[in-house]
Amino acid sequence: MNRSENPSGAGEHPPFGVSRYYQALARSMDPTVDPIAAQFVPQDDEHRILPYEDSDPIGDRRYTVAPRLVHHYADRALLLVNDRCAVYCRHCFRRHFTGYGGGRITEAELEAACEYLERTPAVTEVLLSGGDPLMLGDAELCAIIDRLRRARPDCLIRVCTRLPVVLPSRITEALAEALGSRRPAWVVVHANHPRELTAEFRTAVNRLLRAGIPVANQSVLLRGVNDHVETLQELFSTLIRTGVRPYYLFQGDLAAGTAHFRTTIERGLELMRELRLRMSGLALPTYAVDLPDGGGKVPVESALIRIEDAAYVLRGPDGREYRYPREMDVE
Ligand code: SF4
């Protein structure tokens, strides 16, 4: 993996880095023509930062209850176990942390997280994220899960990772068995384009499934990458045939310097309408958006109240109205 720090500094742009495997999936290094290259090759557009964009668009900082531990939703907590990735996605929303967060979680940070979880029984699921948790070695990862299990034997562990997509060789039989022996656990991957669903990806998924680990996928709706109905249909139908549940299709977050990736919400709704006509419900993800100001994640189709000239107005989980900007210049 090539990796160099971005001289523009933390918080706005992820560093540059890509695995050789993922780079080889690109047919051109021009991010304006190739949907794989678009996800790892920096573009000048990243320097256009809009007033309402932020390096922490979903409000991780606001809901941080202990170092590296984010408790936003009542029954789930997010633990940022590592800041490193095999590919630094140009659309990454966790720009305040990814690549700049100080490496792996320390023992002291893990202890503090476990103490919080011990006194917070409402949390029944712990999401391991980052960065990418599977960039840690097997022993490090298992030690973290085992410590969490001692604190909360009842918790479901969700491993959020792009490695089956961008570095599938990381999913060894040994890793799959290690996770399988630490159930209940799920793996949630992040695939955005059908060309990412290679034979190597399928082998990685099969290892997890054989070890008893269910696998789901979260995609981001990305302009120029997957904002076409045929592309999404092929993505979701291939995932479901591989045994991966298409879980979410996210509207782009308001992450600093990512406006060139966002589509309008009208486009997202239109795509979902068309997909629903073409595909089984089993293969259809929920089209969701993380509301600005840490408002939380909501399904767009049921939360959208009205469309104003400058904003989409959506009902948040707390019953309040939130405004997601309507960017008329993006299409
Ligand atoms: S793998 Fe995930 S955390 Fe890492 S850069 Fe991509 S989207 Fe961000």
Image: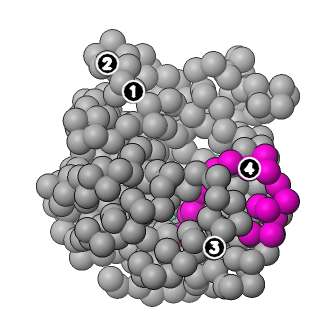
Residue receiving disc 4: 123
In depth, the one of 52 and 115 nearer the eye is 115
Instruction: Tell me the CA gap for discs 2 and 4.
Output: 33 Å
Disc 4 crowd, CA 10 A, few/some/many (<14, 14-19, 20+): many
| Residue type (three-letter) at the residue carrying disc 2 | Ser
| Left-right relation of 4 to 239 | right
Q: Identify residue type, mark 3.
A: Arg
Tag 1 residue: 284
Q: Quadrant of the N terminus?
A: bottom left
Marked residue nearer the N-terminal end (1 or 4): 4
Q: Quadrant of residue 18?
A: bottom left
Which portion, as a residue range, is magenta?
Answer: 114-131
Q: Is residue 127 magenta?
A: yes
Q: Residue furthest top?
A: 277
Q: Is residue 218 above or below residue 67?
A: above
Q: CA distance from mark 3 to mark 4?
A: 16 Å
Q: Secondary structure at mark 4?
A: loop
Q: Secondary structure at mark 3?
A: helix
Q: Is residue 172 above or below residue 5?
A: above
- Between disc 1 and disc 3, the foreground one is 3
Query: With respect to residue 41, does 292 lie above or below?
Result: above
- Residue 147's disc is 3
Tell me which amino acid carries mark 4.
Answer: Val
Q: Nearer the viewer, mark 3 or mark 4?
A: 3
Q: Which residue is mark 2?
A: 280
Q: Amino acid at mark 1?
A: Leu
- What's the residue at 78%, 46% (across, down)? 122
User: Can residue 293 be seen at all in this image of the molecule?
Assistant: yes
Q: Are marks 2 and 1 in contact (CB under 8 Å)?
A: yes
Q: Residues within 10 Å of mark 1 (few under 14, many from 20)?
A: many
Q: Nearer the viewer, residue 110 or 101?
A: 110
Residue at mark 2 to residue at mark 3: CA–CA distance? 40 Å
